[in-house]
Amino acid sequence: MTQYAVLIYAGDSAHREGAEAEQEVHDRHAEELRDADSMVAAFALESVASATSIRGDAVTDGPFVDAKEVIAGFYVIEAPDLDAALRIAGANPVIQQGGGVEVRPVAGGFIRPTARE
């Protein structure tokens, strides 16, 4: 199966104040993806205020692009083709909350094995 990255665009991180109720619906969605054995990995990002960008020799505080919506998180799914990946990603609750998602095939990657106790 092909892996697809689903980039979540929203007003900011799910960790901002007052986001707990919104986060519950995202947690349920993530559980559904895990139960369907579609999700490979998922990560929420801290607030855009914590971003630092590098371009050439310049290091600046803040996101790479100043925009209304930012990448608030991402996850990697497995799907047989792009149409199936779009159906999976299209169920993301951020879409009903005014944000959006971007779906891109994964060209390659690496996940560091975790240390076992």
Image (spheres, grey):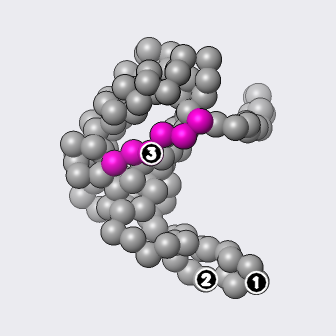
Residue 52, percent across and down?
A: 60, 74
Are dots 3 and 1 in contact, CB under 8 Å? Answer: no
User: Which contiguous range is marked in magenta?
Assistant: 100-105
Please report the residue visible at 24 percent of the width from the left and 58 percent of the height from the top.
18
Label 2 close to label 1 by CB (< 8 Å) = no
Number of numbered markers: 3
State whether residue 39 appears in this view: no
Task: Return the residue at label 1.
Answer: 57
Q: Which residue is mark 2?
A: 60
Residue 38, how many percent across, how many down? 50, 20
> For residue 102, which numbered disc appears in the image?
3
Between residue 79 and residue 74, name the one nearer to us: 79
Residue 109 in picture, x, y percent from top left: 73, 38
Q: Earlier in the sequence, mark 3 or mark 1?
A: 1
Residue at figure coordinates x 74%, y 79% from the top left: 56
From mark 3 to mark 2, how far is it between C-alphas?
25 Å
| Tag 2: amino acid | Thr
Residue type indicated by callout 3: Glu
Residue 82 horizontal/vertical position (percent): 49, 27
In the image, is 12 to the left or to the right of 75?
A: left
* Residue 110 vs residue 23, the one in the foreground: 110
Give whichever of discs 3 and 2 has the lower sequence position. Answer: 2
Left or right, 17 with reference to 110? left
Can residue 69 be seen from the camera position used here? yes
Q: Residues within 10 Å of mark 3 (few under 14, many from 20)?
A: some
Quadrant location of the C terminus in the rendered image? top right
Query: Under tag 1, what secondary structure?
Result: loop
By secondary structure, the bulk of the magenta-drawn segment is best described as: strand
Q: Nearer the viewer, mark 2 or mark 1?
A: 1
